Image (tube, rainbow, N blue to C red):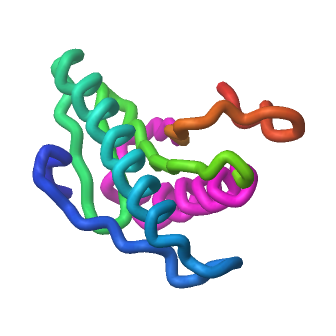
Amino acid sequence: MKSALDPKITQPGLRRQRPIDVVEAERSDLQHWRLEKSIVELCIANQYEPLTNRHIDILCNIGHTSVVFEVKACPPYDIAGPLRRAVIQLLEYRYLYRDSLKPTVKLCIVSDRRPRGGYEWLIG
C-alpha cells in the first residue's frame, strides 16, 4: 500500500453500457477525486494514515480494524449500477487482501448521491 496522498491516475471501467460522454467522464473523474480528497482529509484530521493501492481507493487502519473505502461518483440517472459495482469490489478486496487487513474489516461506499428507493439498505 502507498500513501493516499500520492497523486494517482484512475482508469475508467473496461465495460460500458452506452457510449462514453467525454464531458460526463471528466465530471465523474473530478467528482471521484473530490470525494477521495474529502475522505483523505477526514482521515488525516483524525490522525489516521490513509493508504491506497491500484485496487483500493482508500484504506485506514484504526486499531484492530481496517476500513476500506470505495468511491463512486454516480450520474443522476444511474445510482444502482455504480453501487452494485462498489459492493462487489469491496467484497473482492476483502478477500484479496485478507492476509494484509486487520482482523475486523469495515467496508464503506462513498458516493456523491444518496441511495433512494430500493437502495436505501446500503446506508449504514
From the viewer's perspective, tell me whether residue 5 is left or right of residue 124. left
Res 63 → quadrant: top left
From the viewer's perspective, tell me whether residue 5 is left or right of residue 98. left
Which residue is painted at 25% across and 53% down in the image? 52
The region drawn magenta spans 79-108
From the viewer's perspective, tell me whether residue 82 is left or right of residue 20. right
Seen from the viewer's position, the closer of residues 97 and 112 is 112
Q: Residue furthest right?
A: 118
Q: Residue furthest top?
A: 46
The total of numbered circles placed on residues is: 0
Task: Indicate yes or no whether the magenta region holds residue 92.
Answer: yes
Seen from the viewer's position, the closer of residues 30 and 58 is 30
Res 68 → quadrant: top left
Which residue is painted at 55% across and 77% down in the image? 20
Seen from the viewer's position, the closer of residues 68 and 79 is 79
Quarter of the image with the C terminus in it: top right
Q: Is residue 108 visible?
A: no
Which residue is painted at 37% across and 65% down in the image? 55
- Work out whether 28 lies above or below 109: below
Res 122 → quadrant: top right
Picture coordinates of residue 11 (x, y %)? Answer: 36, 73
Task: Indicate yes or no whether the magenta region holds residue 33.
Answer: no
Q: Residue furthest front?
A: 23
Picture coordinates of residue 42 (x, y %)? Answer: 28, 23
